[in-house]
Amino acid sequence: MRGIREAFPILHQSVNGKPLVYLDNAATTQKPRAVIDALVHYYERDNSNVHRGLHALSMRATDGYEGARARVARFIGAADPCEILFTRGTTESVNLVAQTWGRANLRPGDVVLATEMEHHGNLVPWQELARASGATLRLVPLLGENGEGGLDLAALDSLLTPQVKLFAFTHVSNTLGTINPAAQLCAKARAVGALTLVDAAQSAGHQPIDVQAMGCDFLAISGHKMCGPTGIGALYGRRELLEKLVPYETGGGMVATVSYDGATWKPTPERFEAGTPNIAGAIGLAAACDYLDSVGREHIAAHCHELGRIAYERLSELPGIRLLGPAAGAERSGIVSFALADVHAHDVVTFADEDGLALRGGHHCNQPLMHKLGLTSTTRASFALYNTAGEIDTLVASLRRIQKFFAGQ
Amino acid sequence: MSPELTELYQQVILDHNRRPRNRGKLPSANRVARGDNPSCGDQCCVYIRLDGERIAELSFDGSGCAISQASASLMTTQLKGKTAAEAQTLFDEFKQIVTTGEAPEEMSDIAAFAGVSAFPARIKCATLGWHAALGALKSEPVSAESAADSGLAITTETHLD
């Protein structure tokens, strides 16, 4: 896509004497100039605390922060800005639901349903909630020895009993690259009266999201995985659900009245944002939304999915490679994980770094999934809007060199 | 290949990775511990048969990168016959080598790991097996059958040590 790479200052550098090829986008994406400028502008011109000041800078900061909330709402198709809570990221968003909705509503005998492909961030909070509440956590199985079959939808139908109070699932798997049929999954859950939480960490920056069309009750995103700053993310929740929830944290900013004996809470969303929020982060996140929409998320999705498809095809030509996730020809995101027969992922990543490639090696916060697939780690290449098909050539050439080195011992 | 990478993947390391020594469970072990590296999922289990104060036999298993596997393999060749105190001294020297890149001349094979110092992210790979071995030496006596049980001593690599 034309003009995209120019917008990302960090891409124009050499690493170990080679042009940087950044393929670790599922871990975090790079930031366009527009996002960096928004942060600098805020700190140079508008920095002040929000909501409590009457002076010019405080009003500007408040407008920027609340404008960012409205921008994120529009970005994901939420009906109302008050349905957007700013958090540190997807993990905090999931924990917020577990600690507020979960603690108030789950009883022994209830079931929380998740899937076998969840990131630790959408698995461990439910394990802990189940332990604390006496509810049971069940998992929708993953099909195929390489996870190529996706979620077992027939099993999902039998798992979705009236005891299921919440179905939490990832939109796009951060290891497999699988794109789950989110709207279909939400509809199935709704049919048995279960709420849904969608982990959109890996999808929000790469494809259009419309929470109303999807039909989810909660949706969690991370700013830094969608070209925004680190330390900012959001939780979408349907207004009538949020209004019933007790606060997550208490303190300044979220109270209506306080006496020495107690306090009353502001309405949503302020009720859930105790203390001074990440104002700059929210403003940077809004700039990221603007940037991604200026490129067009339909275009970004088509580009990233095409790179994922090409990478899968090209990598499958390597001897002794085991590729995870959707098979050749099937729809996949721009995330491709693989294991080489005789070279551990850490050694792959160290060697590839010498070729200027940024890859990730490890369990990708998916330890149970790795265990299920009989692996301890994989190497992962993940693409964003600024990557090119030429970078896949660099990746494949580097992997061939690595295989040659380790075969020649 | 860069000089740093050549230094990291020395022949002796590649050899131990390809043909690990003393790999597998030790049926007669009476001390066992596992080292975990949570950042990558690497695991290394070390089995020791302690005879009096001295390590009579030892072995390792687990999964990990070339550096962690070679390091654990080489370690098993170095610790046989040592006491716990001698093992600790040898580990202190090893840690010095992998963090500073400087190895005393008499250190021979272990000195091959000096190249790790140019890759700080890989130091934990090199020390994983050693931490498991030292954990095993400090642990309570066990039978080898119970090695996989929850009573296993576990040392966890962190970013803070």
Image (spheres, coloured by chain):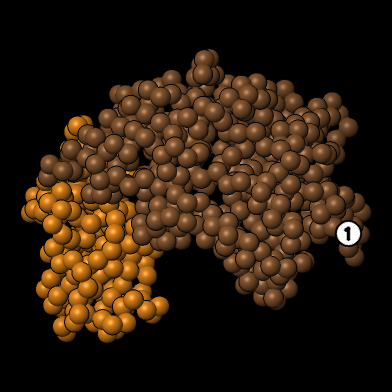
Q: Which residue reaches farthest front?
A: A154
Q: Nearer the viewer, residue A354 or A156?
A: A156
Res. B73 visible in picture:
yes
Could you tell me which quadrant the N terminus of chain B lies in? Answer: top left
Tell me what residue is drawn at x 23 percent, y 49 percent.
Answer: A342
Q: Judge the density around disc 1: few (<14), some (14-19), many (≥20) Cα neighbours within 10 Å.
A: some
Determine the chain carrying the residue at label 1: A
Q: The orange chain is which one?
A: B
State whether residue A387 is above or below residue A267. Answer: above
Residue A117 placement, left or right of A63: left
Q: In which quarter of the image is residue A154?
A: bottom right
- Residue under label 1: A263
Tell me what residue is drawn at x 52 percent, y 22 percent.
Answer: A8
Q: The brown chain is which one?
A: A
Residue A16 placement, left or right of A76: left
Residue A354 image point, x, y percent: 29, 32
Residue A162 image point, x, y percent: 73, 68
Residue B130 placement, left or right of B57: right
Q: Nearer the viewer, residue A173 or A44?
A: A173
State whether residue A298 is above or below residue B81. Answer: above
Tell me what residue is drawn at x 20 percent, y 69 percent.
Answer: B24
Residue B100 image point, x, y percent: 25, 46
Q: Secondary structure under badge 1?
A: strand
State whether residue A333 is above or below residue B26. Answer: above
State whether residue A16 is above or below residue B61. Answer: above
Residue A69 image point, x, y percent: 76, 36
Res. A101 visible in picture:
no
Q: Which of A35 and A104 is in front in this view?
A: A104
Q: Which of A304 and A63 is in front in this view?
A: A304
Could you tell me which quadrant the C terminus of chain B lies in? Answer: bottom left
- Which residue type does callout 1 highlight? Ala
